[in-house]
Image (cartoon, rainbow, N blue to C red):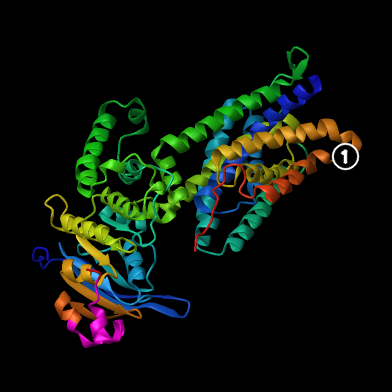
Amino acid sequence: MDLFLQLLITGVMVGSIYALVALGWTLIYKCSGVLNLAMGELTLMGAYVCLSFYTWGIPFPLAVVGMLIIGFILGLLTERLFLRRMVGESILAVIMVTVGLSFFFRGIVAFTWGTDTRVFDPPVFPAEPIRWGRIVVGQVYVWSFVAALVMLVVFVAFFKYTRWGLSMQATADDEMAALSLGVSAHRVYALAWAIAFMAAGVGGTLLGNINGLNISVGYLGLLVLPAVVLGGLNSVPGAIVGGIAIGVLQNLSAGYLSRFTPGGIKEIAPFAFMVIILLFRPYGLWGWVKIERV
Amino acid sequence: MSQPALDEIHLKVDDLRISFGGVQALAGVSLDVRRGEIFSLIGPNGAGKTVLLNCINGLYPPKAGRILFEGRDMTSLRPHQRAALGIARTFQKIELFSGMTVLDNIRLGRHLHMRAGILSGACYVGKAAREELVHREFIEREIIDLLEIAHIRDKIVGMLPYGLQKRVELARALALQPRILLLDEPMAGLNLEEVEDMARFILDLNEGERWRATCVLVEHDMGVVMDISNRVAVLNFGEKIAEGPPAEVQANPEVVRAYLGEVEDLYVSRR
């Protein structure tokens, strides 16, 4: 029972980071219909930018703020330079552009920061774990959880209560109608990319604090897919729940199943899970069921 | 018939061309819509009526030609900029935010143009509160009462019957306080009574002191078109084949040939 609780709690905490990245992914998909396969590389960019600031001696919170600003700008630029000219092109072409973007960003990261694993030095969070009864959780997990929650609340509040957020919702719901009411679609797309960049950056930074930072943190971008499939591709609460569920699933499978396998079950489990969901609930938990009546 | 239109040109479409693949959807269409009139576009299916509305609205970029609104060239403006100029529209296939209430749909059209900042908005004091009150009153008195949708204001739009959804769409377009209203088949799929209501609303919007909206109407219901339009233009295969007062257009032999082939069929109306 202790083991289960332990795995569950760490799972939720890591999952909240996935949730944050998944939220960014969903925003882009919801607003512009772009299936973004470069999400993991957005994570990398953000994380490395933050790491650079930190190693220059800027205090961690300020480094994060700096990263958010850079992420915002990079998001706007990415949309302006690469995605805007793709509006109206076939969905496959747009997806291929995001694949290209992922290579591009990966190249930039390897070129600028190298491929060795880097750590936040000195460590941002104290190594001393927190104990509740017999459950032990590293402080880095707890703080990551808190940070991810704060960011989630901020983004959701932005989406729900600001005029820009409202424009994004309107565009996501019915783009034609939103345009006719005076919403600028380009601004909405750009904003979605900016937010995705910021969310991914925070997610990557937190993961980097847990495991150290190297190119493989970018695989988080793939992990986002099962999360959003579970939640329904275009549902914001779905992305959050999906992210947390994938974190828990990963941890539980690592804890209980890895001794029966040669290893790597943790990596596979979310995707096996995704296939099962697609079989039985292709729209996810809260996705829009699109049925065309002819 | 509404009041005699002023001669001032409100919206000018000049030699507009657009094609999709090999299909010339608009092959050099020119129109003058005068201020305060109801201008109808008719023509067989696929004649390019909706495409023309989409060009005026900015959803499609024309390949050639110009669109002038109140004398100003707005061909290169984006849809949201045109909305800000006062060009609102409804759609042939209803495009409402179907998960929201009627009131929220209308408010959304309004809210996007409110200027109070997030801080005062959150505290609901000062400018934001005043602004909100003004807008709310405008929506209540001018839109909801006019279109007689007070009884459904808190209903979820997706649950409403088709005819009422059409009316809500018109209401949402009004939230922009448009100077030109583009109406894409507002009567399609409505029953007789609803058609009459809709025609009355359009006349109210056109003639009412408060609105005086110039209307560009795409419609297949010939009875309505001939009754309420000041002028009618006929499109066929992307070309304008006639333009003028309803009676004149009705008598035009080319229109009759293009439209239905047989003279007597043209005047079949549901009323």
Q: Can residue B202 be seen in this view?
A: yes
Q: Which chain carries label 1?
A: A
| Position of residue B207 measured from the top left corner of the image (x, y, whole percent) | 13, 57
Q: Position of residue A179 (x, y in %)?
A: 38, 54
Q: Where is residue B192 in the image (x, y as percent from the top left)?
A: 26, 62
Q: Which corner quadrant of the image does residue B131 belong to?
A: top left
Q: Is residue A231 above or below residue B197?
A: above
Q: In this view, does A264 lie to the left or right of A105?
A: right
- Quadrant of the image for the N terminus of chain A? top right
Q: Which residue is drawn at 25% across and 84% down?
A: B256
Residue type at tag 1 = Gly
Instruction: Name the residue at the top extreme.
Output: A133
Instruction: Compare residues A141 and B162 and report the one nearer the observer.
Output: B162
The residue that disc 1 covers is: A263
- Label 1, secondary structure: give it: loop
| Residue sitting nearer the eye, A130 or A206 | A130
Tell me if residue A75 can be seen. Answer: no
- Residue A119 x/y as whole percent: 74, 32
Say if B181 sits above or below A11 in the image: below
Image-quadrant location for residue B56: bottom left
Name the residue: 26% across, 77% down: B234
Say which residue appears at 33% left-offset and 60% top-offset: B77
Magenta residue span? B251-269
Q: Which of B88 and B253 is in front in this view?
A: B253
Is residue B253 on the magenta stretch?
yes
In the rendered view, tell whether residue A116 sits above or below residue B161.
above
Could you classify mark 1 by the number of other residues whose Cα lies within 10 Å: few (under 14), some (14-19), or many (20 or more)? few
